[in-house]
Amino acid sequence: MNKTIVLAAMAILSIATAPETSAGPYHRYSRRCYPVPPAEGPQWGGPQGGTWLQALANQVGQLRREVVTLQTQVATLRSEVDALQKRREALRREIQAASKTPSIWRNWTDETGMRTANAKLVRVENDVAYFERDNGVSCVAPVAGLSIIDRQWIRTWQASRDAIGRTALR
């Protein structure tokens, strides 16, 4: 049976027995409050409006439109969440790929060309290069103290790291 018709029938049956409360006349039935229509008023009928059943139907229609609007908003938010999750997964794969790049062991030379060392570059901070030598020992050298070729290599290495970082932040 239609819920609106059931509500209307319950309201009609309870008109004579409904107690007055501060919120208006209500009928207690099965732990729910169903409004009892007053005799006059634009909301429930009377001189300015239609019947109270029409008012109930209008309210139901308005609630249905609100539900459709909310369902549309939920669908939009779900698609945005899916797009963000895909972007996060792509970034995670990109970061994993960047962290799995093989470390490059090179022969580093100082600016005089007299000293060399086989090591991999770990990081560069404040124009100081941090290396890990092939025997496992960590060492530090100022970037300005390296050969021109090594300084150019470090700039290229930093630019590629910065590009990976900018891509991860998008």
Image (cartoon, helix red, strand yellow):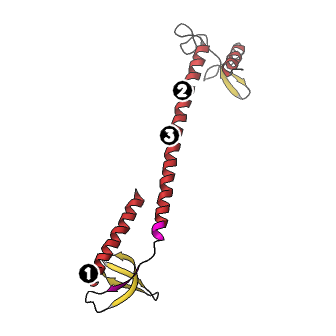
Q: Which residue is mark 2?
A: 65
CA distance separating discs 3 and 1: 55 Å
Camera-nearest residue between 13 and 154? 154
Residue 150 x, y percent position in the rendering = 30, 80
In the rendered view, does 85 fall on the left or right side of 155? right
Disc 1 marks which amino acid?
A: Ile
Q: Which residue is mark 3?
A: 76
Q: Residue at x 69, y 13 (%)?
A: 12
- Sequence-wise first label, 3 or 1: 3
Residue 97 x, y percent position in the rendering = 47, 66
Q: Is residue 108 magenta?
A: yes
Question: Do we see residue 65 in this rendering?
Answer: yes
Rendered view: 11 above or below 106: above
Magenta part of the chain: 97-110
**Within 10 angstroms of label 2, few (less than 14), some, or many (20 or more) residues?**
few
* Residue 17 in which image quadrant: top right
In the rendered view, does 23 fall on the left or right side of 152? right
CA distance separating discs 1 and 2: 71 Å
Q: Which residue is mark 1?
A: 148
Q: Is residue 38 magenta?
A: no
* Residue 143 in which image quadrant: bottom left
Disc 3 marks which amino acid?
A: Thr
Placement of the N terminus among the 4 image quadrants: top right
